Image (tube, grey):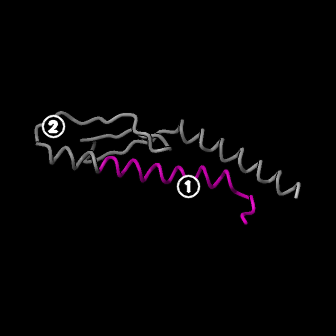
């Protein structure tokens, strides 16, 4: 039982460290060749949105499309980073 408790504490510490790492990790989502760029942390916190000025003249629909595309690109990249970081944190730890 003591061994199991030690493993749980080790896993908890590794997961906490991984979450801290994800909070410090940033990814960039890019849409339409840089028309919109979304900077996001590995915990899905949006840090910055950059929209090229020429997109703003194309109307609200164009802005919505590039922002959504850039966000989805950033989220996909964050998901990949999360899988890698959390996978490394839990590697070798037997799950019940």
Residue 64: x percent and y percent? 21, 47
Marks 2 and 1, how far apart in space? Answer: 35 Å
Q: Which mark is residue 47?
A: none
Residue at image location 50% in from the left, 44% down from the top: 42
| Magenta residue span | 69-96
Residue 73: x percent and y percent? 36, 51
Q: Disc 2 or 1, which lies upstream in sequence?
A: 2
Residue 63: x percent and y percent? 19, 43
Q: Is residue 64 left or right of residue 12?
A: left
Q: Nearer the viewer, residue 95 or 41?
A: 95
Q: Quadrant of the N terminus?
A: bottom right
Residue 10: x percent and y percent? 77, 48
Residue lying at the far front in this picture: please name it. Answer: 1
Q: Secondary structure at mark 1?
A: helix
Q: For the stretch drawn in magenta, what is the main secondary structure? A: helix
The answer to if 62 sits in the magenta stretch is no
Q: Quadrant of the C terminus?
A: bottom right
Residue holding disc 2: 56
Residue lying at the far right in this picture: please name it. Answer: 2
Residue at image location 50% in from the left, 54% down from the top: 80
How crowded pointer 1 is (Cα within 10 Å; few <14, some 14-19, many 20+) is rated as few
Residue holding disc 1: 83
For residue 9, above or below residue 47: below
Residue at image location 80% in from the left, 53% down from the top: 7
For residue 3, above or below residue 28: below
The answer to if 71 sits in the magenta stretch is yes
Labels 2 and 1 touching (C-beta < 8 A): no
How crowded pointer 2 is (Cα within 10 Å; few <14, some 14-19, many 20+) is rated as some
Q: Secondary structure at mark 2?
A: helix
Q: Is residue 17 left or right of residue 45?
A: right
For residue 49, above or below residue 8: above
């Amino acid at each position: 039982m003591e061994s199991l408790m030690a493993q749980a504490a080790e896993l908890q510490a590794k997961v906490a460290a991984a979450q801290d790492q994800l909070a410090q990790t940033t990814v960039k989502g890019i849409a339409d060749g840089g028309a919109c760029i979304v900077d996001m942390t590995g915990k899905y916190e949006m840090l910055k949105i950059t929209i090229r000025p020429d997109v703003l003249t194309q109307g609200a629909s164009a802005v919505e499309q590039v922002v959504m595309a850039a966000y989805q690109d950033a989220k996909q990249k964050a998901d990949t980073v999360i899988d890698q970081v959390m996978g490394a944190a839990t590697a070798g730890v037997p799950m019940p």
